[in-house]
Image (cartoon, rainbow, N blue to C red):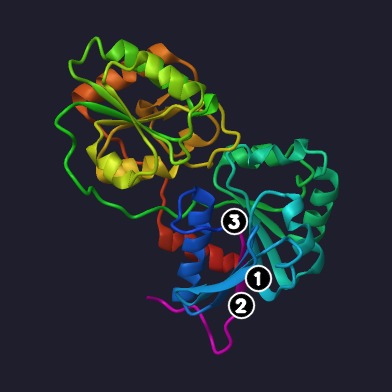
């Protein structure tokens, strides 16, 4: 592996909120993958993470400091990289950290709507003062930034780091649809249930597998129970790659990009294991994924037609935008040393 360090390596500090293992959510995966990539290239790397716990651990040679926003703000580093939208949680770091360069990556599909928050005026002023560059993953996000108080900061579009996975088992003998997300109306679970009710009449023995890692009884578990004809399986925490490998079609038809990862990594994983998927043509998603796998939000008839086609023909189109981890890391290093 190419080593970018010279005699004196720079120190890189990553900030991410509530880093926990095993990794589940996209932004925390990005933080850990970035840190590991830089560590493997010889840089000194640490992670600071706002958390209810206060402790210091070491994992794979990387120091991780947990604590309150004030506890972790005593940072002295060459590069301070916030993996966060502007938020009160990073204010102590913005005010107290000693860093030669500070940059920020926002992964929220809708930038988490930070400019609408009551605290935005104060936080964005501190970001403008200290942060030299903002990175996003889509042109859609870049356009959104133009209507915020960060409009004058330099912005670059940099693809996320992507997982490297492979199929772990054969597809199930019984035709199956998979939904893996929280049972929330914004995640498209209503549309999935309505589409399934139609499709179960067309495909004998079709089943729907619903996985929610934070599964609790709520209005959606009751709704699922009402329409369940012993053909809907509800699960909690699962191995996502195993579930994707067994599924015939993976579904994630979100209604909005707020509180979602800008580029759904589950679609990347679905492509890598060879499982067709259906998502929403919303936000920056169409910049990365083929139109044959996308429908308009809330459009149940189109969702039904798309699923029916994929159940019959099982086609999987590749990503529409080049995503190579080594190139993303190279560009990131160029940003750090510029």
User: In this view of the protein, can residue 178 be seen by the observer?
Assistant: yes
> What residue is shown at x 14% (from left), y 31% (from top)?
173
Question: Which portion, as a residue range, is magenta?
Answer: 1-17
In the picture as drawn, the residue positioned furthest to the bottom comes out as 7
Residue 3 among magenta residues: yes
Q: Quadrant of the N terminus?
A: bottom left
Residue occupied by mark 2? 11
* Relative horizontal placement of residue 262, taking residue 205 as reference (left or right): right
Helix, strand or loop at mark 3? loop
Q: Which residue is mark 1?
A: 79
Disc nearer the start of the sequence (1/2): 2
The answer for how far apart the CA atoms under marks 3 and 2 are is 22 Å
The tally of labels here is: 3
Q: Residue 4's x, y, as percent?
A: 49, 78
Pick the residue in front: 151 or 206.
Answer: 206
Q: SS for tag 2?
A: strand
Q: CA distance from mark 1 to mark 3?
A: 20 Å
Main SS type for the magenta part? loop
Is residue 63 visible in the rendered image? The answer is: no
Mark 1 vs 3, N-terminal side: 3
**Can you say whether 170 is above or below 16 in the image?**
above
Instruction: For mark 1, give the secondary structure.
Output: strand
């Amino acid at each position: 592996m190419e080593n970018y360090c010279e005699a004196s390596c720079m120190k890189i500090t990553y900030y991410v909120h509530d880093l926990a293992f095993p990794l589940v959510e996209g932004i925390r995966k990005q933080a850990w993958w970035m840190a590991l990539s830089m560590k493997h290239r010889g840089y000194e790397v640490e992670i600071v993470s706002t958390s209810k716990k206060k402790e210091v651990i070491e994992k794979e040679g990387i120091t991780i400091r947990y604590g309150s926003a004030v506890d972790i703000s005593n940072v002295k580093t060459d590069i301070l990289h916030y993996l966060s939208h502007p938020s009160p949680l990073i204010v102590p770091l913005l005010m107290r950290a000693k860093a030669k360069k500070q940059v920020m990556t926002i992964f929220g599909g809708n930038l988490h709507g930070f400019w609408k928050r009551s605290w935005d005026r104060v936080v964005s002023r501190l970001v403008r003062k200290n942060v030299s560059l903002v990175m996003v993953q889509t042109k859609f996000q870049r356009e959104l930034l133009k209507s915020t108080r960060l409009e004058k900061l330099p912005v670059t579009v940099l693809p996320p780091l992507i997982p490297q996975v492979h199929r772990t088992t054969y597809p199930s003998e019984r035709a199956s649809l998979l939904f893996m997300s929280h049972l929330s109306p914004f995640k498209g679970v209503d549309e999935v249930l309505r589409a399934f009710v139609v499709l179960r009449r067309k495909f004998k023995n079709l089943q729907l597998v619903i996985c929610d890692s934070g599964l609790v009884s709520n209005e959606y578990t009751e709704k699922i129970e009402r329409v369940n004809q012993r053909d809907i399986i509800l699960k909690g925490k699962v191995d996502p790659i195993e579930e994707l490998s067994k599924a015939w079609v993976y579904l994630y038809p979100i209604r909005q990009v707020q509180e979602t990862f800008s580029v759904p990594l589950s679609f990347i994983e679905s492509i890598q294991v060879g499982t067709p998927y259906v998502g929403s043509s919303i936000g920056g998603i169409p910049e990365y994924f083929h139109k044959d796998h996308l429908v308009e939000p809330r459009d149940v008839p189109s969702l039904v037609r798309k699923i029916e086609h994929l159940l019959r023909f099982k086609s999987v189109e590749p990503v529409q935008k080049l995503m190579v981890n080594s190139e993303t890391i190279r560009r990131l290093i160029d940003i750090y040393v510029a």
